Amino acid sequence: RATTGYLPAARIPMLPPDLTAARRALEAGRDREALTAEIRLGPAGAPECLRLFRSVVRVTRRLDYHGTRDPGELPADLRPLHDMALDLRRARIAAGARVLEVPAAHLRVRDGIPALEARGVGGAGDVLVAEAMVAFNRAAAERLRAAGAAGLWRTQEPPRGDLPPEDDP
């Protein structure tokens, strides 16, 4: 399975529940094993992976996308990371990437009635998480390729036809 399916009264997990819920879920106050990438921003914001290493992380607070939409709503210690994420994004765009901010769908059940809601994306928390994920995946892929190691790769076909203009909503 390529993704976890979320239903009003159930969840169909991508990975076995004992792995995701018990040993890997990021629960506040619990130590969790992780794979960490130490990344430095090079010229013009391009990421340079210094090292990948096993680590232990502990979540100290829980944030959500709604509460981190405005950069000023980010905790002060995360604002420099947001600035770096913006540098990473600018470097990717300069290299030809297109950023598509498609609203995220959320299925909620209120009083027993399912309702599909759209959450706008592109806020500070979205940018920080998205760019960190892209930078980490790039670092991991480069290390796997350099080592000649096997890995799962997700690819995209080239666009069919012209892309819409950058300012097209």
Image: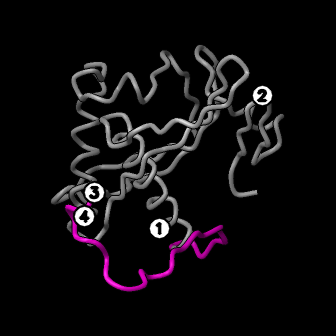
Q: CA distance from mark 2 to mark 3?
A: 41 Å
Q: Secondary structure at mark 4?
A: helix
How packed mark 4 is, by other alpha carbons closer than 10 Å (few <14, some 14-19, many 20 or more), is few
Determine the residue positioned at 41% across, 80% down.
159
Identify the mark at residue 169; answer none if there is no mark.
3
Identify the mark at residue 60; answer none if there is no mark.
none
Q: CA distance from mark 1 to mark 4?
A: 19 Å
- Residue on which disc 1 sits: 142
Three-letter amino acid code at the position of disc 4: Ile
Q: Tally the numbered discs.
A: 4
**N-terminal-most mark, 4 or 3:** 4
Q: CA distance from mark 4 to mark 3?
A: 17 Å
Quarter of the picture containing the N terminus is bottom right
**N-terminal-most mark, 3 or 1:** 1
Q: Main secondary structure of the magenta part?
A: loop
Is residue 96 found inside the magenta-colored segment of the image? no
Splitting the image into 4 quarters, where does residue 151 fall?
A: bottom right
**N-terminal-most mark, 1 or 4:** 4
Comparing labels 2 and 1, the label whose residue is closer to the camera: 2
Q: Position of residue 29 (x, y in %)?
A: 59, 14
Where are the magenta residues, as a range?
146-169
The correct choice, above or below, for 101 with respect to 11 in the image is below
**N-terminal-most mark, 2 or 1:** 2
Q: Position of residue 103 (x, y in %)?
A: 43, 46
The correct choice, above or below, for 139 with respect to 155 in the image is above
Asked whether, in this view, residue 77 is left or right of residue 142, the answer is: left
Three-letter amino acid code at the position of disc 1: Glu
- Residue on which disc 2 sits: 22
The correct choice, above or below, for 119 with respect to 95 in the image is above
Quarter of the picture containing the C terminus is bottom left
How packed mark 1 is, by other alpha carbons closer than 10 Å (few <14, some 14-19, many 20 or more), is few
Determine the residue positioned at 69% across, 16% down.
111
